[in-house]
Structure formats: structure tokens, C-alpha cells
């Protein structure tokens, strides 16, 4: 069972979860939004993007800076599947090229920090970007906005012609890892309505506008969004069979393919939001927990072990557990209990940030882009209040 088969179940089950977790707030936000499309409006083009039928002679590779988990292929192409991956380069000239490989993907292309241009489900091939707003040196980021549970997609790298030159791409000193479920992915966060088809969920999911990207931008940090919609700590949504997030996390691709070994990835902050799927629905016959008490105990013990493993892998990292749920809800209580157990076990660098009173007007009662901004602001306030999150020289 994957994202395509849980959409309908989500719509009904999350209504019950919202009522239990958020009280009347979740029900009183416009039950139906009149007019408008479920698809976000495209921004005005900052530059021209076009597929190239015949490759111009003399193209040469341009250095690519990758943030996110990838598996390099024999031809140099990069296979990726976790959300939020982004590719960056810098050059001087009036055009740049890049290759897109197989797989449905929604990309956001931003030159010199301008508003991103969407490139949705591009055909495999070579693309040219040109007609920039200003001349001279440029920085380009291509970010993956969509979720790719169905299979990995391929990015083939950047290229320039003879009239362009490579330029230095500044390195960021801060790194933040986000681990979670659909709330971290940005599931349907740009939708203008809650009732979404599978295709509309895919089209309106935008990790580049989600919590991870917003917090990272505030700190000028690189980020990884290692999250999968529908997954939990010990139990996936409605009990469907698949790797839980802790089981999938060590690997570069979903399906336990390739190890996620990257010596250069040493996040100083790890923000985790897990538990919504563990507790969103009632237990069913045949699941390994006979009672909610057993489920809660397994969740707490497994979550504590998972965080302990992360801290051993990234010593010195500050761990912040956050959850978007109503005050006093089961999942908020459980995440708070995990944070307290970690502190009692000697993990002093652990914080807890609950966020409630959200509109939940994204697809199937998920946080909207405005909700993502509210969550990001809560995380930023919490991190700013800590005195030792960043190393010396990286002070807040």
C-alpha cells in the first residue's frame, strides 16, 4: 500500500483526527472554499526554460552541488527519491543547460534567489535556461517539490557552452536535517481545498514551500527532508504494511536501497515530527498491539532508541521534536513523553515544540503553506532561545 492507495482513507480518517485533536477549530475553517483551483498559480517567469531537441556542440559539465540523498550512476546521473533534494551551481554567462532523466517530478528553478519557476513532469532530455533578469554571474538552484514514493527520479547535472564560465558557489556552514511524515513533506500544502484526488495531492505538494525549507532559509542552512507521507515510528497510517520511518531512514533510496553514508552531512539541528500516523486510526485485528497502551509503549521505546542512534551518529546535534496536533491530544502527549524520557536518560540537547490551532486547509486536512509558516516560526523561536545550537562562529 502506497501514497496512491491511502489518499481516500486519509480524507475520512483525518476528519476524525482533526475533530479529536483540534476541537471545533478544525471544523470551522471554511468547509468548502468557493472557486479557485486546487493547483497553485504559477509565478511570473524569471527566465526562459525550454527543452533542447539537439544538443549544442561544445557543452561541458558544470560543477553540481547536491543537498539530499542521491545515488550516482555510471553515467554521472544522480538518482534520488527522498523529498526536498536540491541541486545548485554557479556560472557567468547568459545561458545554462541541465539534464533531466526518467521519472515524474515537479521541479522549482530559481536563479539568483528570484521567485522559482515550476517545471512539472518534464520529459527526459536536455533543457536550456536563458533570458535572465540581469547579466553577469548567476547562481541556480533546482529543487524537487514533489514526493516520489512511487519510484526514484534522475537529475543529469548542469552544463555550459563556450560562452559561459563556471563561478564559485558559496558553501553554507549550517546543516539541518528534518525527519518526519507528510507534515514534513508538505503534502498538499499549496492546495486551495481539502478534497483532493491522488493527482491533485501530487500536484499541490511542495516541499520547497514547507517547514524544512522555511526554517533552513531563515538560518541560511542546507537541509535534508528525510520524510515519507503515511509512515510512523512503529505503525504506518491505518496499519498499512511498509517500512516505518526509522526502518527506511538509513538508506539512500526507499525500499532499503543504497546506504545514506555522507561524511559531509553533519547536521547541528535534527528536527523530527513523527507520531501522527502511529495514532491517527484505531487498531485493527491482526496488528501486533492488542491495546492502545501497548502501542504507546512500543512507540515511546522505539522513538527513544531512534533518537539515541541519531545522536550517536551526529554527536553535538540539537534534537527538536515537534508535532502539529491539538492541545492534549494523544499524539501530542506521546511526543512530549518521548522528549521527557530522552532528557531523563541524559540526552540534555532535546527540545519539544507542539504546534496547535492550525487551519489544516491543505489536502485531506493537512497543514497549508500558511500553517507551514506558523510551524516554521515556532521552531525558529525555539531554536533562537537555545544558547548552544550552532558552533562558535555560527552564533544565532
Image (tube, rainbow, N blue to C red):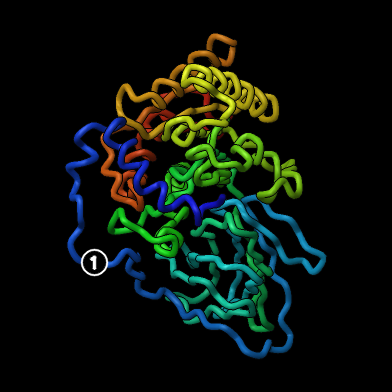
Which of the 4 quarters of the picture holds residue 175? top right
Task: Tell me residue 343's x, y (percent).
Answer: 53, 13
Q: Residue at x 63, y 59 (%)?
A: 151
Task: Tell me residue 165's x, y (percent).
Answer: 66, 74
201 up-or-down from 160: above or below = above
Of residues 173 and 272, the one nearer the viewer is: 272
Residue lying at the far right of the rendered structure:
74
Q: Is residue 44 left or right of residue 155?
A: left
Of residues 239 and 296, the one nearer the viewer is: 239
Q: Residue at x 33, y 46 (%)?
A: 365
Q: Is residue 262 left or right of residue 9?
A: right
Element under disc 1 = loop
Which of the 4 quarters of the picture holds residue 24? top left
Q: Is residue 140 left or right of residue 206?
A: right
Q: Is residue 146 visible?
A: yes
Which of the 4 quarters of the picture holds residue 13? top left
Q: Residue at x 52, y 37 (%)?
A: 239
Task: Tell me residue 169's x, y (percent).
Answer: 61, 59
Q: Residue at x 54, y 46 (%)?
A: 228
Q: Which residue is tagged 1?
A: 36
Residue lying at the far front of the rendered structure:
285
Q: Is residue 392 visible?
A: no
Amino acid at each position: 500500500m502506497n501514497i496512491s492507495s491511502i489518499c481516500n482513507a486519509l480524507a475520512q480518517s483525518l476528519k476524525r483526527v482533526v475533530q479529536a485533536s483540534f476541537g471545533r477549530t478544525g471544523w470551522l475553517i471554511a468547509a468548502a472554499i468557493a472557486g479557485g483551483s486546487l493547483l497553485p498559480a504559477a509565478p511570473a517567469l524569471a527566465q526562459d526554460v525550454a527543452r533542447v531537441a539537439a544538443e549544442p556542440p561544445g557543452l561541458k559539465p558544470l560543477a553540481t552541488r547536491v543537498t539530499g540523498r542521491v545515488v550516482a550512476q555510471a553515467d554521472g546521473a544522480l538518482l534520488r527519491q527522498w523529498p526536498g533534494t536540491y541541486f545548485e551551481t554557479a556560472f557567468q554567462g547568459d545561458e545554462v543547460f541541465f539534464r533531466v532523466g526518467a521519472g515524474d517530478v515537479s521541479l522549482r528553478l530559481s536563479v539568483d534567489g528570484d521567485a522559482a519557476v515550476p517545471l512539472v513532469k518534464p520529459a527526459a532530455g536536455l533543457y536550456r535556461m536563458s533570458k535572465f533578469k540581469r547579466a553577469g554571474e548567476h547562481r541556480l538552484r533546482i529543487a524537487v517539490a514533489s514526493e516520489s514514493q512511487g519510484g526514484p527520479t534522475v537529475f543529469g547535472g548542469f552544463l555550459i557552452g563556450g560562452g559561459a564560465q563556471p563561478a564559485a558557489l558559496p558553501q553554507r556552514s549550517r546543516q539541518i536535517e528534518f525527519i518526519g511524515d507528510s507534515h514534513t513533506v508538505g503534502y498538499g500544502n499549496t492546495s486551495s481545498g481539502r478534497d483532493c484526488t491522488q493527482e491533485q495531492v501530487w500536484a499541490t505538494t511542495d516541499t520547497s514551500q514547507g517547514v524544512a525549507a522555511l526554517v533552513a532559509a531563515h538560518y541560511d542552512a542546507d537541509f535534508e527532508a528525510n520524510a515519507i507521507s503515511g509512515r510512523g515510528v512503529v505503525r504506518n497510517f491505518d496499519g498499512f504494511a511498509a517500512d516505518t520511518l526509522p526502518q527506511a531512514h538509513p538508506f539512500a533510496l526507499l525500499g532499503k536501497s543504497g546506504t545514506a553514508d555522507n561524511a559531509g552531512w553533519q547536521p547541528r539541528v535534527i528536527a523530527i515530527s513523527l507520531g501522527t500516523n502511529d495514532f491517527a486510526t484505531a487498531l485493527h485485528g491482526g496488528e501486533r498491539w492488542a491495546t492502545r497502551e501497548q502501542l504507546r509503549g512500543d512507540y515511546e521505546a522505539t522513538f527513544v532508541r531512534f533518537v539515541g542512534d541519531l545522536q550517536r551518529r551526529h554527536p553535538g546535534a540539537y534534537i527538536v521534536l515537534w508535532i502539529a496536533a491539538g492541545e492534549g491530544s494523544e499524539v501530542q502527549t506521546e511526543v512530549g513523553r518521548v522528549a521527557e524520557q530522552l532528557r531523563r536518560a541524559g540526552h540534555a540537547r532535546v527540545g519539544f515544540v507542539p504546534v496547535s490551532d492550525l487551519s489544516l486547509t491543505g489536502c485531506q486536512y493537512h497543514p497549508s503553506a500558511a500553517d507551514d509558516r506558523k510551524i516554521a516560526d515556532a521552531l525558529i523561536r525555539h531554536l533562537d532561545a537555545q544558547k548552544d545550537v550552532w558552533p562558535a562562529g555560527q552564533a544565532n
